[in-house]
Amino acid sequence: MADIFDMTKGELQEFLVANGMKKFRADQIFHYIYKQGITDWDDMVLLPKKDRDILNERLPIYFPVIESQLEAPDGQTVKLLLRLRDGQTVETVLMMHDYGNSICVSSQVGCAVNCAFCASAKNGFVRNLTAGEMTAQMLAFRKAVTPDLHSIVIMGTGEPLLNYDNVLRFMRLIHEQDTFYLGYRNMTLSTSGIVPAMYDLAKEGMPITLAISLHAPNNELRRRIMPITDRYPLEEVLKAGENYFNVTGRKVTFEYILIKNLNCNLSCARQLVHLLGGKNILVNAIPMNDNYDVGLYRPADAEIESFVSFLKKNGIQVTLRREMGNKIQAACGQLRIQRDK
Ligand code: SAH
């Protein structure tokens, strides 16, 4: 069944005409959905009753149900657990920054990549999300919290480059003037390093920011944290990142979770400088959100501080991610797992 949130305006126009309705109704419908946050045909009162009846029958709207809405005590992070058409659930997070509101979008239900620190993969991979289900995550915030959306990061549950076609369709859709009109520069896609897809992405002509989850400075340690390293070794991931920069001119970000007693000692910092020094990249250091199930924890402040300052002293551009989600289980997949328990 077609999904209105998966459609471009051009596709909706075709659908309307094929079903005996006027083409210009697409403008009204897109205005209702994206400018007013209305997601029920019967509330679109400018449409003739006859059209609404046809649409209810042939293009029924299913809008995800908000199963829970959690707000962090600082008032700057809101997390939604959404129930999809088939009963599956996904998490999505809104983060309020100085520069604007950013949404962390999930791209799959569950995940197959199985990184040690991450809660998302715990119950395995379930299915890909459609582009419409990703658009609906943004619409859910638009409706429930704020219409003021500045950027997205595809950094929620799932490996976006293993759901390549839908994720690309989603980014193109929200870029359109009649939808969210979001610039590609305001979109970040985070990957565990699916090398062939990174080369494909470089050729799409979309200047989005590529973030690469690195989390270790050598293959041996990275394999323990991210088993996908067996498939795509560090050297190849770095080469694909460099290619992305060369082709798009967009600076690549490397995410590095700081995990207590594991990957943020001085030796790791040295290796990281050796690996990334002199490159035009950004390191985003991320204190681990404690995961009691797997026994991986946030290091002490002093440890974080000395790791970050060592990188800085050695010429690496590094930012320390503000920890926003900790109190509301906002790190990937934690809320969904809790619900399933
Ligand atoms: N599959 C993609 C996107 C999902 S994970 C990828 O691997 O990049 C994206 C990011 O979520 C990770 O790089 C990390 O920055 C963050 N993350 C996930 N679990 C976390 C945890 N327990 N603590 C801190 N950050 C976490």
Image (spheres, rainbow, N blue to C red):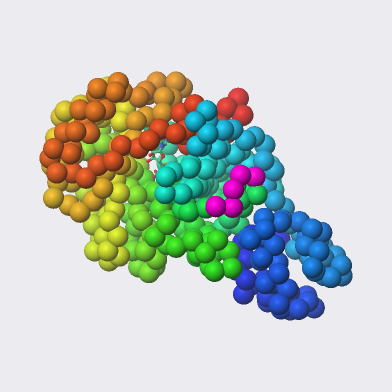
The quadrant holding residue 40 is: bottom right
From the viewer's perspective, tell me whether residue 302 is left or right of residue 167: left
Which stretch appears magenta? 144-148
Whole-percent x and y of residue 303?
24, 24
Q: If the picture is divided into quarters, which one holds ligand 1?
A: top left
Q: Is residue 146 magenta?
A: yes
142 horizontally vs 234: left or right: right
Residue 297 place in picture, x, y as percent: 37, 23
Q: Quadrant of the N terminus?
A: bottom right
Q: Residue at x 15, y 29 (%)?
A: 267
> Toward the viewer: 285 or 223?
285
Q: Position of residue 57 (x, y in %)?
A: 82, 62
Q: State the image quarter where residue 260 is shown.
A: top left
Q: Quadrant of residue 225?
A: top left
For the image, the number of numbered tags is 0
Q: Is residue 184 left or right of residue 69?
A: left
Is residue 257 positioned above or below 169 on the image? Answer: above
- Residue shown at 82% from the left, 59% from the top: 42
**Residue 163 visible:** no
Is residue 23 visible from the viewing direction of this image?
yes
| Residue 116 drawn at (x, y percent) | 39, 31
What residue is at 35 percent from the left and 24 percent from the top? 298
Which residue appears at 78% of the width and 76% of the height?
A: 21
Overall secondary structure of the magenta section:
loop
The quadrant the C terminus occupies is top right
Residue nearest the observer in this picture, 340 or 32: 32
Is-magenta flag for residue 123?
Answer: no
